[in-house]
Amino acid sequence: MILTTMGRDEIKRRKMRDADFSPEYKRLLRGCLFGARGGLSVGFAIASATLGSWLTPARYGWLAFALIGSTMSVVYWWVWGRIFKNVGLTVE
């Protein structure tokens, strides 16, 4: 269902046009996306590292936390990059 006063034929003829943003705005948007991707990656990596350190003996918990955290931060960086790209959150 389309909630508009335009007719069906008029809607089909119209084309979507992208706005032409300034380079400063694109830089700001790119930085925000970078921060969101980094924050999500680090947050998920810390959660994974904490769970992994709980599953190891206490004296090796720090090692498990470091290895799992560093590995998963790279993995989640890639995962969130793919997710952002697939839903169209990129700046060109």
Image (cartoon, rainbow, N blue to C red):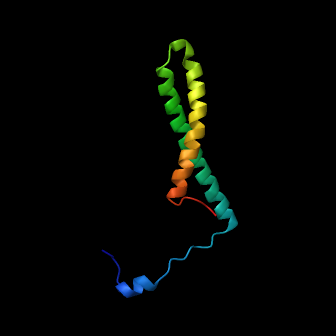
Q: What residue is drawn where x is 57% and y is 40%?
A: 75
Q: Position of residue 16 (x, y in %)?
A: 50, 77
Q: What residue is drawn where x is 50% and y is 31%?
A: 48
- The relative height of residue 65 versus residue 76 in the rendered view (above or below) is above
- Residue placed furthest toward the right: 23
Task: Identify which residue, 43 or 15, lies in the foreground.
Answer: 15
Q: What residue is drawn where x is 49% and y is 32%?
A: 47
The quadrant the C terminus occupies is bottom right
Q: Position of residue 7 (x, y in %)?
A: 35, 86
Q: Is residue 84 visible?
A: yes
Quadrant of the rendered image containing residue 13: bottom left
- The relative height of residue 62 versus residue 69 in the rendered view (above or below) is above
Q: Position of residue 71 (x, y in %)?
A: 59, 33
The quadrant the N terminus occupies is bottom left
Q: Is residue 6 visible?
A: no
- Residue placed furthest toward the top: 59
Does 55 sit left or right of 63 as displayed? left
Q: Position of residue 62 (x, y in %)?
A: 58, 20
